[in-house]
Structure formats: structure tokens, C-alpha cells
Amino acid sequence: MKVLHVGAEIFPLIKTGGLADVLGALPQELRHAGADVRLLLPGMPAIADAMLHGKRVCDIGALFGAARVRLMRGQMPYSHVPAYVIDAPYLYRRDGGPYQSSDGREWPDNLQRFALLGWVAAHLASGELDPAWQPAIVHAHDWHAGMACPYMSQHPAVPAASVFTVHNLAYQGLFAQADFPLLGLPQRFMSAQGLEFHGQLSFMKAGLTFTQRITTVSPTYAQEIARAEFGFGLDGVIRARGSDVLGILNGVDRTIWDPALDTALAARYDADALQGKALCKADLQRTFGLEPNPDAPLFAAVSRLDQQKGLDLMLAALPTLLEQGAQFVLQGTGDPALQAAFRQAAAQRPSQVSVYIGYEEAQAHRVVAGADVIVVPSRFEPCGLTQLYGLRYGTLPLVRRTGGLADTVVDANDLTLEDGTATGYAFDAASHYALEQAIRRAIAHYRQPEVWRKLMRRAMAQKFSWEASAARYMDLYRSLAHGASPHA
Ligand code: ADP
Ligand code: GLC
């Protein structure tokens, strides 16, 4: 079955978060499961310049303000997954991030940049751009690829079915309604039943409304987004889609996140030989300038610093954690006020708190491996990958019970310790009190080495594999391909 995955980030070339990890891993796993998967990516320099064996497929001509648009085909480095890359230098070839300039401002032409991505997806699906390969399924990820769905739905010659995956409903791709004519769609799309969203137009809503099936990255988040509390104004749209909405958990890419093979670490280890983890902890304490104390419980967070992630709760809970003789390491970027507050906390207690403002992939591995506990106190979390990496590395996740965090971490209480299912700590209220209680419980268990070792082994035995997720996507594709009929 031919499946086209459409997205804006891919590990290790462009990454602002977990979406990149998913697009780096899932297509490969689907290929192992027998699907003929290709990627479609925008030709940002980091992608266009890294593509292997790039060949021109066709000249598309002038589109969305770009005088020259070409479609290239090659392979992704490392994974060798076949990929189409849109060569449109006017829209994509610039320094800065995929969505924002280096000074943090949205690119003013994001509407054109991501409309083009959707347009090319639809015209690959119609067979016009590459007659040699026509997908049965177009799988679009997040608002960046959302426009694939309306373009497919109004194209008379697209037999492919569409799947739209929500990785995060908080980012919606909102643009001025006055720019609607730039999209080249019939006026009827600019309605409450179409792209219109409170006086603006929304690429996320475009995906949600015009796709055949919606998936999101955990079963709990699939339910949460049907409620006003988590819907960011789109819960009504989600509810209207009823049983077309499905949650499929993300997995861990074991070729990249495996403590027994990870070359970024000071030492490697596995569940049967945990000595290496102690060396990783010592290395982390040394490189982050903390007191080199093997008995101090070491908590860590690797995260975007954003309202979603709840690290303000962690900041408020920090005094409790330090009082108990624990240490805290943070690697993250985002909200300037939070960055400054964490820096200040580190300056006040340098032997117990250390902060790296920035993102460095190899260091993320060393933090996850060296810590005892990975803290993910998110207000909402579609899936979350860092808690899965924590489980894999025997670094117990301490999470807020929401979204994918609720689906992947089993709180260590009397019952779950007794029946051997506990894998971490979970709390409910989005308050620092609730977080502090969970921290206290974790530290109490940490001080009982036998209990802790059991928990670590149990965590490391969890299998959140891409293989299982890929099997579920394959079922979905098959059901759609069999029932697929041309769009109206
Ligand atoms: P999200 O995608 O919401 O940030 P996930 O837990 O799904 O959350 O994915 C986080 C991934 O992004 C992990 O691989 C993590 O190491 C990485 N990451 C964390 N913080 C940053 C950051 N500031 N910039 C880029 N990647 C980050
Ligand atoms: C988003 C979500 C995160 C999820 C990731 C990959 O960035 O915030 O929870 O794990 O996408 O699906």
C-alpha cells in the first residue's frame, strides 16, 4: 500500500519537538510493516541540503508567490526513507526556524509556505506530479500539513483517502481571513463548516474538517480534545467527527533511545547491569557542576519551556525538592521569564540546581540517562515522548495524569507496588502542592534501594514500541483503502 506522510519536521534534520521524532521513526516502521511509504517535506535548507540522491521529478512553476517551484525526489539520510522535497527557495530557503525567524517571530508568509505543502500533497495524490507513484493514503501531520485535506477534497481526480494526525491542538495555523483568496479554493470553504475560525482561517480546522479520519497520539488525548478544557476552541469540531477520531500512542525509536547502545552516554547499561547508570549520574553531576553525591535523588526535565509543560509548577515545587536533599537539572528553552527564574534558582543553589538553556540532542540523552527521575508536569500532553525515554532508561517518570502521560505511566502506590505494575509517579491537580506530594513519594521510595531497583526494572521492561503503533496505523490504512471512494 502506498502511503504519503506529509509534515514539516523530521529528526535529525529539523526538530522543534516530538513531531520530528515521530516523522523520523514512524515511516520507517511502516515500511517494515510492508507499506510503501514516502515522505513529503518542505525544502527548508536543513532538509533540501541533506537529501540523498536528489533528482528533479517535475517543475511546478509559479505558486503561492514563489516564481519557481520544483518537486525533487530522493532519500532521507540515515533512514533512507524515500522523500519528496518541495524546492521553492523563495518560500523555504532562509535562515531561522521552520515556523519562525531567529528572533522568534512567525514568518509572515506561513500561509503560503504551508498551503504549498498541502497543495503539493493533493497533486501528488492525483497523480499529476509523479504519475509513477500515486498514494492510496495521504497522512498529514499537524496544522502544517492540514491544507492537504481541503485541497484533496475539492480535487476531482483524487482517489486517495486522508488521515490527519493531531500532535498538538494548541498550535492551529491561524491566518487573516482576508488572505483566503491566496489559497485558490472556492469561496464555500471560507465558512463555519470550512476553514473559518472566529473571524480567522485555521489550517488545523482545515485538516480536522476535510480529512476522512483523525488520529491523535494517545487514547486519553483523543477523549480530552472533545472537551472544552482541552479543545482550544475546536472541541466542537472534534465532537462532530464522532467515531472518526482515534488515539494511537507514539512509540520509542530504539535505534536512537537505547541505554545499552547509546554512544552519547558516559557508560552504557541495561536492566540486568545497572552499574553504567551510576556512572551516567556521576557524569551528569560533574558536567552540570552539581555536588558529586551518588545518594542525592537527581530529578531532571528536558522540555520546551511553555505553558503546556507546567514547568512553572516545578519551579514552585523546587524549594520542597531541595529541602529533601535532592538535585534538579533542566535542559530547555522557551519562555524568557521561566528561563530567567530557573537560572536564578541555579545561581542560588549551584550544588543542587543546574540549568542549561538551549537544546542539545546528545546532552538530552545524557540528562535522561543520568537522572533518577524525569519530571513531566504538563497541563496537557498529547502523548509526550520524554516520559517514554525515561522509562526506557530506568529514569522513573513523574508526570501529571493527562493525555499520553496518563496512558503510559502507572503511579507507584500500595496496590501497584504490590502487584508489580508501578512504573513511576502521577499526580492530578495542576498545582505545585500536588507535584510536591508526588516528589515526596518518589524520594521516599528512592531511599529504599530495593523498592527503587524494582521500579527501575519494571519501567525498563515497558514496551512502547513503534512496531505496535505502526500495526494500528496499518489497520487504519487498510480499512480506509478498502472503503475508499473518490471524494465528492
Ligand atoms: P513536545 O513535542 O510537546 O515538545 P514530546 O515529549 O513529544 O514533547 O517531545 C519532546 C522531544 O523534543 C524530545 O525528543 C525532547 O528531547 C525534545 N525537546 C525537548 N525540548 C526541546 C527544545 N527546546 N527544542 C527542541 N527539542 C526539544
Ligand atoms: C506534540 C505534543 C507531544 C507529542 C508530540 C509527538 O509536540 O506536544 O505530546 O508527543 O507532538 O506526537
Image (cartoon, rainbow, N blue to C red):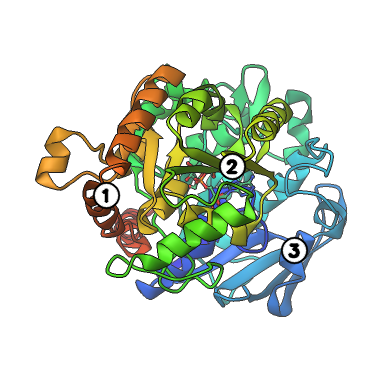
**271 relative to 319 in the view: left or right:** left
Question: Is residue 159 visible to us here?
Answer: no
Q: Residue at x 60, y 62 (%)?
A: 362
Nearer the observer: mark 1 or 2; the answer is 1
Which residue lies under the disc numbered 1? 449
Which residue lies under the disc numbered 3? 46
Nearer the observer: mark 3 or 1; the answer is 1
Which residue lies under the disc numbered 2? 330
Where is residue 406 shown, x and y percent of the image?
A: 32, 36
The numbered mark, 1 or 2, whose residue comes first in the sequence reads: 2
Where is residue 379 shown, x and y percent of the image?
A: 47, 26
Question: Is residue 321 visible to us here?
Answer: yes
Q: Tell me the SS state at disc 1.
A: helix
**137 relative to 83 in the view: left or right:** left
Q: Tell me the SS state at disc 2.
A: strand
Image quadrant in which you'd find residue 431 = top left
The numbered mark, 3 or 1, whose residue comes first in the sequence reads: 3
The numbered mark, 2 or 3, whose residue comes first in the sequence reads: 3
Using the numbered discs, state the Cα–Cα distance from disc 1 to disc 2 in whole angstroms: 25 Å
Q: At label 3, which amino acid type do we have?
A: Ala
